[in-house]
Structure formats: C-alpha cells, structure tokens
Image (cartoon, helix red, strand yellow):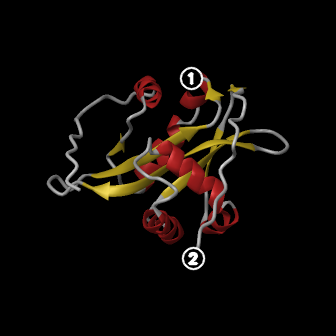
C-alpha cells in the first residue's frame, strides 16, 4: 500500500475550541481518512515519526487496520464535525508485573482546545482502558503542553524515559 501525502504550505489560523468529542475510528474510516489520520499521528509524536519514514508509516497503517493501534479523532461538534486533532494508543502489557496499560503514543490538536473541553474526554479513555482490562493509562510525550493537559486530567509523572542513539 503506497502512501502519498501533501503537506499544506501555510499554517492554518488557530481557533479556540470549547467543546470536542473523541470518536474511535474504525478500519473503514481509517481507509477513508488515512491521510488526515497519519498527519495527526505524525504531528502528535513530536518528531519521533516522520512522513518520510515510509517503513514506519506502513507499519502504523498495518497496526491501525489490524486493531493493534487505535486512533481517536478529536472533533468539534456541529452539523459537519471538524477534525481538531487526534490520539493514537495501543494496549500494552508490563513484562514484569503483567499489568496492562492503554499506552498513548501520539496526541495532537491543530487548534487551541480549552482545558474544559479536554476534561470532558477523560471518561471515554478510562472506559476504553477498563474494557480492555487495563489498570492504567500511560502517555509518552515530549510536548510540555500535553504534559500540562495530562496533569490537569489526573496524570502524574511516574518514570523517566532515557534515550541514547546508537546509529
């Protein structure tokens, strides 16, 4: 499956969003909105994933289609809901403790979303985690704004990820 994406040459103007809904995207929708979903995932990784890394992009698509990677579209409600951003996550298992976690891998908003709007989404992800027998939700980010939002939603900084490149 080949992926050809065009990036917009100009930045869109930011709009304040006071109300959003999160919609878990199904495989048919992934096919229909593949480019927008991939752009949101890439933007939400903070540079970890790039569109030019075609092997990783193909792996992301495969995981989205087989259900091992989940994507929630963040939509501004209305007659024609507008895509505001998205989040990708997968269910992982701790090798030592065998605890399952919903692990958020990318989190992106193209607009300025109010804290009240973010807070309205919290229960949806908690319910998804419970339905998948997860005992926690874990997020990985290098974006200070995402950390601030997560802390307002009850997340705590529990561990530090240390990285040493070997290439």
Task: Quickly name the residue at label 2.
Answer: 1
Point 54% across, 28% down: residue: 119
Point 56% across, 30% down: residue: 118
Q: Where is residue 115 in the image (x, y as percent from the top left)?
A: 56, 23
Task: Quickly name the residue at label 1.
Answer: 115
> Farthest residue in the bottom direction?
1
Instruction: Note whether 154 is above or below 43 in the view shown.
Output: above
Residue 86 quadrant:
top right
Q: Residues within 10 Å of mark 2 (few under 14, many from 20)?
A: few
Point 38% across, 35% down: residue: 142
Cβ atoms at labels 1 and 2 below 8 Å apart: no
Indicate the secondary structure of the residue bearing disc 2: loop
Indicate the secondary structure of the residue bearing disc 1: helix
Quarter holding the C terminus? Answer: bottom left
106 left or right, relative to 99? right
Tell which of 124 and 33 is nearer to you: 33
Residue 151 quadrant:
top left
Q: Where is residue 98 in the image (x, y as percent from the top left)?
A: 20, 56
Q: Distance between the residues labelled 1 and 2?
A: 38 Å
Instruction: Note whether 62 is above or below 87 in the view shown.
Output: below
Q: Position of residue 9 (x, y in %)?
A: 69, 43
Tell which of 134 and 30 is nearer to you: 30
Pointer 1 or 2: first along the chain: 2
Quarter holding the N terminus? Answer: bottom right
Instruction: Note whether 86 is above or below 144 in the view shown.
Output: below
């Amino acid at each position: 499956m080949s992926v050809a994406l065009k990036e917009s040459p100009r930045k869109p103007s930011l709009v304040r969003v006071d109300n959003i809904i999160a919609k878990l995207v199904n495989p048919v929708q992934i096919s229909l909105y593949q480019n927008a979903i991939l752009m949101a995932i890439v933007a939400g990784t903070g540079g970890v994933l790039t569109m030019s890394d075609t092997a990783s992009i193909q792996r992301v698509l495969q995981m989205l289609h087989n259900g091992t990677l989940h994507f929630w579209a963040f939509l501004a409600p209305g007659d024609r809901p507008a895509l505001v951003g998205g989040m990708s996550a997968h269910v992982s298992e701790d090798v030592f403790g065998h605890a399952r976690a919903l692990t958020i891998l990318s989190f992106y908003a193209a607009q300025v979303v109010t804290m009240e709007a973010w807070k309205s989404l919290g229960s949806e992800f908690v319910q998804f985690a419970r339905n998948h027998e997860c005992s926690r939700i874990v997020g990985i980010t290098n974006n200070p704004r995402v950390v601030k939002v997560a802390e307002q939603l009850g997340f705590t900084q529990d561990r530090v990820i240390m990285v040493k490149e070997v290439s």
